[in-house]
Image: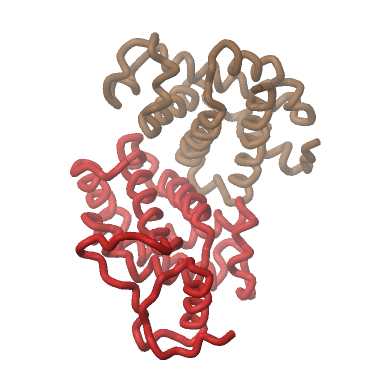
Chain colours: A red, B brown
Amino acid sequence: MSLTAKDKEIVKAFWTKLAPKADDVGADALSRMLAVYPQTKTYFAHWKDLSPGSAPVKKHGKTIMGGVADAVGKIDDLTAGLLNLSELHAFTLRVDPANFKILSHNILVVLAIVFPNEFTPEVHVALDKFLGALSRALAEKYRYPTTRSEPQNEQHFSPPLSISTSKRSSMCWLAAVGICRETHKGTSSKR
Amino acid sequence: MVEWTEQERSIITNIFGNLDYEDVGSKALSRCLIVYPWTQRYFASFGNLYNAEAIKTNPNIAAHGTKVLHGLDRAVKNMDNIKATYAELSVLHSEKLHVDPDNFKLLADCLTIVIAAKLGSAFSPEIQATFQKFLAVVVSALGRQYH
């Protein structure tokens, strides 16, 4: 179910209406996710306050919508455009991708509340497809195959030198169990 | 057995007590058919479903949406025994209508969105949680008699 030209047009047009309210939408969607799907709270055990509209929730809602805004700008190639974010979610955050669907649903609920007239079924389906494509791009790096032939334009996965030690060691472990193929050299892989 | 607090019961009875069944029912079903087009497979005999406009103005879809929403009344009136209340309806959907039970969740999601649009910010996270819990129990009961 890839995005048609019409879908992209609808998403971009709706985004211009949404952009000024993006932070509030993000905060509300995240609040709802935590309230309606309590299992999602497990990812935020390090926050002091998980109640709707709390400071960490507002801040994180803004971060998330920043990512969505970025995705709107890269709508023509989400997989390539969101590579770094995918690596972050796959190796550092390790969010179960089932949760992307849950957050997407709550974003749509908030859009229905904030834009009751503009969030028509036609806009709904385009946005649902877009959020689905975004989620798939985000899950891209989750399971790196152990043996595969190289597609022509793909780079070897090779972490930048600035990456934190914990991430490097988790990647070494992944390589050791054959889940992730990597080509960086010289890091101690003893655990 | 599903446990309901007094607050949850009153949230559900309030939502349904103030509902325009024809408006919400038709909007929820037509939204489902537009957002999840594969659900149209169950409505081949309903006439023109060719595009979103046709679906939105199709009188058969509107009537059926209303019917489905009134079907939820039974669950509202029997919140402590939704599974038994829907046993027959579950058999109907499985044996006669041959509806894939995954579709119940899709319609439930569209109903949530239509109610959200209607109630606006009054549809708080707590109310959303209760409403979705209610719909989840309904969805589960409707899929219960499949084999």
Q: Identify the residue at horizontal 55%, vertical 54% (top origin).
A: A32
Where is residue A180 shown, x and y percent of the image?
44, 69
Residue B37, quarter of the rendered image: top left
- Quarter of the image with the C terminus of chain A is bottom right
Where is residue B39 shown, x and y percent of the image?
43, 25
Q: How many marks?
A: 0
- Quarter of the image with the N terminus of chain A is top left
Is residue A20 among the parts visible in the rendering? no
Left or right position of A186 against A77 = right
Residue A53, quarter of the rendered image: bottom right
Where is residue A175 shown, x and y percent of the image?
47, 73
Q: Identify the residue at horizontal 73%, vertical 20% (top origin).
A: B85
Left or right position of A127 against B39 = left
Looking at the image, which is closer to me, B127 or A99?
A99
Q: Identify the residue at horizontal 30%, vertical 26% (top origin).
A: B52
Residue B81, quarter of the rendered image: top right
In the image, residue A24 sits, relative to residue A173, either above or below, namely above
Is residue A84 among the parts visible in the rendering? yes
Where is residue B63 shown, x and y percent of the image?
46, 14
Looking at the image, which is closer to me, B141 or B132?
B141
Q: Identify the residue at horizontal 37%, vertical 88% (top origin).
A: A162
Left or right position of B128 against A145 = right
In the image, residue A140 sits, relative to residue A180, either above or below, namely above
In the image, residue B117 sits, relative to residue B78, either above or below, namely below
In the image, residue A155 sits, relative to residue A132, either above or below, namely below
